[in-house]
Amino acid sequence: MAAVYSDLAGKVALVTGGASGIGESIVRHFARQKSKVVFFDIKAEAGATLAKTLTAEGLSALFLEVDVTDIAALRNGVEQARQALGPIQILINNAAHDERHRTEDVTPDYWDDRLAVNLKHQFFAAQAVLPDMKAANAGAIVNFGSTSWMAAQGGMAAYTASKSAVLGLTRSLARDYGPYNVRVNAIAPGWIMTERQIEKWLTPEAEVELLKRQCLKRKLTPDELAKFTVFLASDEASACTAQHYVVDGGWV
């Protein structure tokens, strides 16, 4: 049984990249907390199916097809969510894409694209919802980073640069908006076994390395990330801000 945080009931929670993977699990967990969940994704079919499934269970879930790398569309999506559900009280900046790339092949356009999908939208999503949080004198933002840069992972320099910058963004926003009782934290997931990770990267050799490096000798699931995310957004974590929480089974 997952913990129940009564303070989350009725709160409007916005999750980016919520149609699949870790994001999907986060959406499900907020919905089960009786939050009013709105989630963005470019995966229209998966997003619509998830929202339909949750609403059929009597839960609150609104899907909006939004490309978060399009800042005008992102801002419009936030306004649509606000008009439909009310002021945004929780923001989960989860959307990302860990595409591998050789340093020699990176062009300026590719670099900008990787920062757009992995970092830039986190700032502008926060900028869009912070007026709601300031007016309420309360709010919680969780930005998703990665342990990849902490582990000195190669083959994805633009990704690791983006994800390391999430920590700086988080601490700056926490300092600026703490006087308004807005908490801003970051989560750095380790290797979480989403369908995409299993299909693309989980070779027998990689699984051996995983079990060697992690203190916990098992695979980590999206639900484990979602449960911690919900906790950080709840009043149970009311004194936690400007922090970077590693959830990786003891890899780094």
Image (cartoon, rainbow, N blue to C red):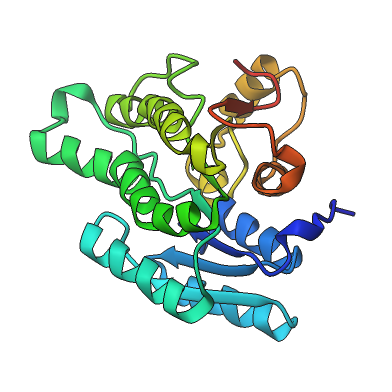
In this view, which residue lies farthest toward the right? Answer: 1
Q: Is residue 214 above or below residue 82?
A: above
As drawn, is 42 to the left or to the right of 189?
Answer: left
Write the residue at 66% across / 82% down.
55
Quarter that holds the C terminus: top right
As drawn, is 36 to the left or to the right of 119?
Answer: right
Which is nearer the eye, 28 or 20?
A: 28
Which is nearer the eye, 164 or 222?
A: 164
The image quarter in which residue 5 lies: bottom right
As drawn, is 117 to the left or to the right of 56?
Answer: left
Residue 48 x, y percent position in the rendering: 50, 78
Q: Is residue 235 above or below residue 111?
A: below
Residue 147 x, y percent position in the rendering: 51, 25
Q: Is residue 107 above or below residue 128?
A: above
Which is nearer the eye, 4 or 211?
A: 4
As drawn, is 35 to the left or to the right of 177?
Answer: right
Which is nearer the eye, 180 or 250?
A: 180
In this view, which residue lies farthest toward the left? Answer: 108
Residue 29 x, y percent position in the rendering: 70, 59
Quarter that holds the N terminus: bottom right
Residue 119 x, y percent position in the rendering: 33, 39
Write the residue at 34% across / 50% down.
127
* Total numbered labels: 0
The image quarter in which residue 111 lies: top left
